[in-house]
């Protein structure tokens, strides 16, 4: 960092290639302010942006720039708590909040631009490299964020883990490991596995076959899905907001991955581009949030 | 550009140091949608961000990332026209709109993150380098944007040049020339010269003495300032939105600058940090827009 906040722009030392993503969250659209603390809102906004870098196989380290929109009358202490929540997550992943812009806005709004660096652009994993014969895996568990949100929304009651929705963990370290191991394609699971796997399938021009019954369902999800009258597997595949990674990789590379960190849930085939579930009727689309 | 829109992040080749600025405009806060065309809104949003890079002495060339918030029911053609207006300005200054994020928002909102590159961070001009003995100059003319806005707001009538407000020109090429010529400090005039010169003075720890009667007043401004019952020089010093550059440089370097491009309006002195006008009573602060 050569120049810091307070000048017209930030100056930072670069490496070979910049990998940049931008992600915006707006109160009432992507979250509801009364459901989250200030630090959780900041954490979650930065996590969604960093998750995109994780899906490219970038490891920890880089810069984040924040455009913050705040409604008139917002307490300065509240704004600082939002920024502090983001700052804590940034530090955890070796990111520096290197600049920003604060403005008045009709709703609380955070837009994070995050920048990671790589010396070899060939190491960056896109959405377009999946090949027939690849296995399809997902990190961690699915459905936990959706279940937590259902409880926050009073649509269900149960032992959902609030942090799965309120403080998602961008998988930067694991994403880097998967890239190193030879991942062909990756995406982060923000809109639900059914939707995000379709992005991979369409960009790679392949058919992805997934098994609902193989999905790693987060604890507490089955109970909440039943209250919502949705099959737990279907809920886990469509609820979104988990910010886990979906990866396609060849079987020999897959054999080297720690099975504690990844669950194999399907395979890549030739055929019309798209996603099919072997044990669900018809196409699954994104679960509609109540707002 | 290695990867483009449609992946999780954009990948671009880097050079030594990244210079990054972020700037957000919100309908009803920074502009009023009925007063501008879609392309003008896009142009103006990107121009305000690029102007920050101009003030660092960066020349043309780089990337821009757009976070776009659009209210429900906005016509897609309108959104495309906003982006097209930004795209045209970007191309003019050799910038690529390399990525972005579109989301629903309660008001039309554009946040641009712009990135320029330099091999030598010593060539970047900050706000903190002004020295006693420097001359203070401003590029172009002042007050034109404020006068155009007064006409758009129906606060005045007259021959103000609408484009001065609607399509400001970021001074990237001239900023680079001033940096090369040995500028000690620069800032872009977004909040009015009185306010922006104070930023320079405070960051540099110097006293800046300006002369209202020496300010280069844009055509049509005097007439409109009189309707608003404001002295034309005072209006030019406080109205803002001109996106010209204010520069401090030593007299020997100043002698080499084409006087067609720059007007000398004051000097840097030792003494308590701040701005004084030799021909105005008291301190001038930013002109309050009507919204």
Image (cartoon, coloured by chain):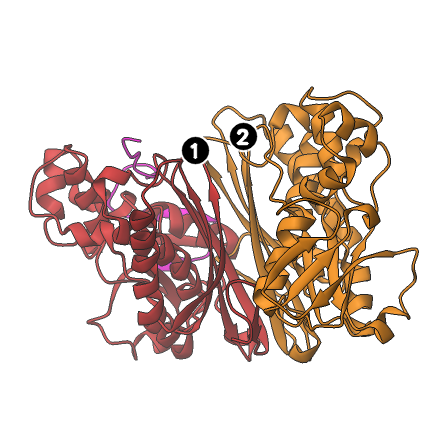
Chain colours: A red, B orange
Q: Is residue B204 above or below residue A153?
A: below
Report x, y in % for residue A12: 55, 73
Which one is nearer the viewer's eye here, B22 or B290?
Answer: B290
User: Which secondary structure is most common in the magenta stretch?
Assistant: loop
Marks 1 and 2 in Cβ contact (< 8 Å): yes
Residue appearing at x 11%, y 54% in the figure: A219
Q: Quadrant of residue A171?
A: bottom left
Let me know if marks 1 and 2 both belong to one chain: no
State the quadrant of the C terminus of chain A: top left
Q: Is residue A274 magenta?
A: yes
Task: Describe residue B63's horizontal placement relative to residue A4 as left or right.
Answer: right
Residue appearing at x 68%, y 61% in the figure: B208
Q: Is residue B287 above or below residue A64?
A: above
Q: Quadrant of residue B16?
A: bottom right
Classed neighbour count for the residue bearing mark 2: other residues with Cα under 10 Å, few (<14), some (14–19), many (≥20): some
Q: Quadrant of residue B155?
A: top right
**Distance in Å between CA atoms under marks 1 and 2:** 9 Å
Report x, y in % for residue B111: 55, 47
Which label sits on residue A106? Answer: 1
Report x, y in % for residue A216: 19, 57
Residue at disc 1, secondary structure: loop
Q: Is residue A128 above or below residue A23?
A: below
Q: Which residues are magenta?
A: A266-291
Which one is nearer the viewer's eye here, B278 or B285?
Answer: B278
Task: Describe residue A158's horizontal placement relative to residue A10 as left or right.
Answer: left
Q: Is residue A277 magenta?
A: yes
Residue at disc 2, secondary structure: loop
Which label sits on residue B28? Answer: 2
Which one is nearer the viewer's eye here, B126 or A128?
Answer: B126
């Amino acid at each position: 960092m050569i120049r810091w906040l307070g000048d017209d722009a930030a100056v930072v030392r670069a490496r070979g290639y910049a990998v940049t993503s931008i992600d915006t969250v707006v109160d009432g659209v992507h979250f509801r302010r009364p459901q989250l603390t200030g630090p959780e809102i900041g954490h979650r906004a930065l996590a969604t942006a960093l998750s995109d870098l994780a899906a490219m196989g970038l490891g920890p380290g880089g810069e984040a720039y924040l455009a913050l929109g705040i409604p008139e009358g917002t307490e300065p202490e509240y704004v600082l708590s939002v920024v502090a929540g983001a700052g804590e997550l940034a530090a955890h992943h070796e990111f520096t909040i290197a600049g920003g812009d604060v403005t008045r806005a009709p709703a609380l709004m955070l837009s994070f631009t995050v920048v990671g660096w790589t010396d070899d652009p060939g190491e960056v994993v896109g959405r377009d490299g999946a090949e027939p014969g690849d296995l399809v895996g997902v990190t961690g568990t699915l459905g936990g964020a959706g279940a937590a949100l259902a409880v926050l929304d009073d649509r269900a009651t149960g032992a959902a883990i609030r942090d799965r929705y309120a403080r998602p963990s961008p998988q930067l370290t694991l994403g880097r490991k998967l890239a190193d191991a030879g991942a062909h394609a990756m995406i982060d699971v923000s809109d639900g596995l059914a939707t995000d796997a379709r992005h991979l399938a369409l960009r790679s021009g392949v058919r992805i076959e997934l098994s609902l019954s193989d999905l790693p369902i987060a604890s507490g999800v089955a109970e909440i899905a039943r209250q919502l009258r949705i099959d737990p597997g279907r809920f886990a595949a469509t609820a979104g907001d988990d910010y886990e990674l979906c990866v396609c990789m060849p079987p020999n590379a897959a054999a080297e991955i720690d099975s504690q960190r990844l669950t194999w849930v399907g395979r890549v085939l030739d055929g019309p581009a798209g996603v099919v579930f072997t044990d669900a009727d018809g196409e699954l689309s994104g679960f509609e949030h109540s707002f």
